[in-house]
Amino acid sequence: MSSHKRFVSFSGVDGAGKSTQIAALRSWVEAQGLRVKTITFWDNIACLTQVREGAGHKIFKGEKGVGSPEAPVNRRDKNVQSWPMTCVRFGLYTLDAFSTRRNVKRALAGDADFIIFDRYIYDQFANLKLRSPFVRAWVKMLMKIVPRPDISYVLDADPKAARARKPEYPLDFIYINRRAYLDLADILGGLTIISPGPVQQMQADVLRHAFRAMGFQETAKPGEPEVTLQRAS
């Protein structure tokens, strides 16, 4: 295998199953004897997070915490879609883009062989009105300074199923948010959409793309539940 370091990102609506797929990919990569680092976008990259959280709670009267089927919450932050809020996001996401660039360079200079980003700048862009030509042009411009991962996973999900797993936002917003991720894939290209399905099938799809990026080739036919690997020559 090449000594070239790889980094991937996982994006998608809340409840799409990112944590599950990240854990599975990390376990597989570590089983290959490689050092893995996971970077969480909100905790390690996003700028002015306390201000952003405060706005959601104090200005928009959103509830705190992470929603679960046993304890749903009603957040008010990224689902606020007014144009004044969009203008604020332009400034915040510009800061996030430069922060992403710095953190990617720092991670690639570190001792990890494989870096996984739990959310990426794409998840910020998905909060914008991507049907606007101006917004689309702005996103393309900002992406010129953001490094592109070796694989940019976008986990697609049925909005009703996603909300059942993680009830934080109204269902109508989840439909809008899902559409935004698909629009973003059209705008930027190069995003790997993982179709919704059983957890194991999605895991197999995620791993197959990782196999190719890491210099492996699969010997099983597509669709088979088990995949035998061998090093690519």
Image (tube, helix red, strand yellow):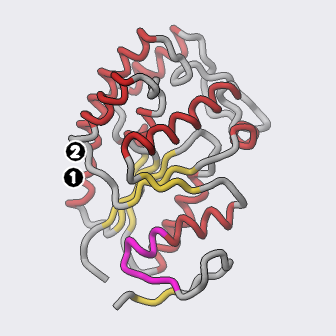
- Position of the N terminus, as image quadrant, is bottom left
Residue 147 counted in the magenta span: no
Three-letter amino acid code at the position of disc 1: Lys
Task: Pick the residue in front: 32 or 83.
Answer: 83
Which class describes the residues within 10 Å of circle 1: few (<14), some (14-19), or many (20+)?
few
What is the span of residues highlighted in magenta in the rendered image? 209-218
Q: Nearer the viewer, residue 183 or 118?
A: 183
Q: Residue at x 33, y 22 (%)?
A: 134
Q: CA distance from mark 2 to mark 1?
A: 5 Å
Q: Position of residue 230 (x, y in %)?
A: 46, 90
Height in image: 101 above or below 225? above
Q: Position of residue 168 (x, y in %)?
A: 66, 30
Res. 67 image quadrant:
top right
Examine the rendered structure and indicate whether residue 218 appears above or below residue 107. below
Q: Which residue is mark 1?
A: 105
Q: Is residue 210 magenta?
A: yes
Q: Amino acid at mark 2?
A: Arg
Nearer to me, 127 or 49 = 127
Q: Marks 2 and 1: CB-CB under 8 Å?
A: yes
Q: Is residue 154 left or right of residue 215?
A: right
Q: Which structural element holds mark 1?
A: helix
Q: Is residue 226 left or right of residue 230?
A: right
Disc 2 on helix, strand or loop?
helix
- Please state if 111 lies on the left or on the right of 12 as rendered: left
Residue 99 point in image, percent of width and height: 26, 38
Q: Relative to residue 227, is residue 93 depicted above or below?
A: above
The structure residue drawn at horizontal position 33% and vertical position 24%, both measured from the top left corner, is 92
Residue named by callout 2: 102
